[in-house]
Amino acid sequence: MSQQLIDHIKKTVDLKPDELERILNAFRKVRYNKKESLQRPGELCRYNYFVVKGLLRMFFIDRKGVERTVQFALENWWMTDCLAYGSAKGSDFYIQAVETTEVMRLDFHLQEKLLNEVPSLEKYFRVLYQKAYGAAQMRTRLFYEWSREELFHHFNSNYPDFVKRVPQYLLASFLGFTPEYLSEIRKKAVS
Amino acid sequence: MSQQLIDHIKKTVDLKPDELERILNAFRKVRYNKKESLQRPGELCRYNYFVVKGLLRMFFIDRKGVERTVQFALENWWMTDCLAYGSAKGSDFYIQAVETTEVMRLDFHLQEKLLNEVPSLEKYFRVLYQKAYGAAQMRTRLFYEWSREELFHHFNSNYPDFVKRVPQYLLASFLGFTPEYLSEIRKKAVS
């Protein structure tokens, strides 16, 4: 599973053999069970997670007690609460394994040391966060402009594997409607 | 105005004297008039803008012909369409000067060269985009959880200078309601 992370980094930057070793020493492989929590609100956010196999989600519980999913991470995606990561401020989000999930976990304190030792990783993370931020700009646009039903069809057309894999109630909580309404839309789309 | 950019970079990374010069050579100072467009949908997105003085906004026009503002950039903020920047794909957004605005503008082609020459800028941009992405995660939460009226009060309490400075119809288009409704909320808040 280490190789998968290295391959992902190498898509953006070159790595020397001694750098490979430093990277692998900084990460820890961890396996989480289905529904296990990796992060809870109020806790310090120490880790950034690279998903090797499985699926993570980030969510919060709103004032009505309803879970609202703000983000998913499938294989080769990273997930952390970026404002809280490494800060003295507690996280505002839950991070939870949707399926049994294997990650490569990077501790913030080791990250700082690692980035000094392997400066090319700065470029890797810069490109990563730049793309993620660009996707967030586009998401803002889509959520402003499109109806919830249109958003579902957009995800269904563009990310069919993702839509098939995510449990229906979580997809509904991400798109902002009830599981019953999602079920209706799905039926309409098939018929 | 160059010094302001250098000061901003130096808050995150150290720079050597020859690096300062390389940075300043890569940027171009540009002044835009109030309401002037810096970027239009469909155009290639060549530039990343650092605001020295003034205010930029990013928006799109929805299917009903209504302008929807997705982001503002005041002094010391950067703005570009991050998915389109440097790609062969046209932008999905307008970028416009809300006031007369002075920027330091970075051409994508010069950026690539500059980042090779001054690698510490990778860290500067990595930290910048990481924070911006974190803010986008939090924004997703706020827009999910809070009513439009609560969002206005949140912005009013946390960014009073920003709320005073942004024209009312643009703040409304950012928060997702009509200028008339914003005006009502403001009156209620004062009385």
Image: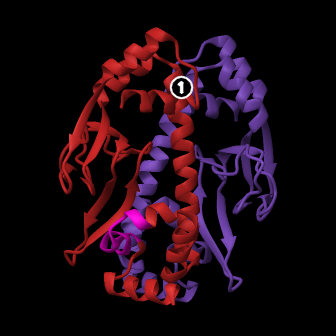
Chain colours: A red, B purple
Looking at the picture, how far across and down is residue A93, in whole percent? 27, 56
- Along the horizontal axis of the image, is B165 left or right of A94? right
Image point 42% across, 73% down: which residue?
A: A175
The chain that hosts pointer 1 is B
Q: Residues within 10 Å of mark 1 (few under 14, many from 20)?
A: few
- Along the horizontal axis of the image, is B87 left or right of A176? right
Image point 42% across, 49% down: which residue?
A: B134
Image point 31% across, 18% down: which residue?
A: A25
Looking at the picture, how far across and down is residue B41, in whole percent? 77, 63
- Along the horizontal axis of the image, is B52 left or right of A16? right
| Pointer 1 residue | B10
Under mark 1, the amino acid is: Lys
Name the quadrant containing residue A182: bottom left
Looking at the picture, how far across and down is residue B133, in whole percent? 47, 49
Image point 61% across, 73% down: which residue?
A: B170
Looking at the picture, how far across and down is residue A185, in whole percent? 45, 86
Residue B13 in sight here: yes
Q: Main secondary structure of the magenta part?
A: helix
**Residue sitting farthest toward the top:** A18
* SS of the residue under disc 1: helix
Front residue (pair A168, A135): A168
- Look at the image and give the residue range highlighted in magenta: A164-174
Name the quadrant containing residue B131: top left
Residue B11 in sight here: no
**Residue sitting farthest toward the front:** A191
Quadrant including the N terminus of chain A:
top left
Name the quadrant containing residue A29: top left
- Along the horizontal axis of the image, is A62 left or right of B26? left
Front residue (pair A64, B12): A64
Looking at the image, is B171 positioned above or below residue B58? Answer: below
Front residue (pair B41, A22): A22
Q: Does the segment drawn in magenta span residue A135?
A: no
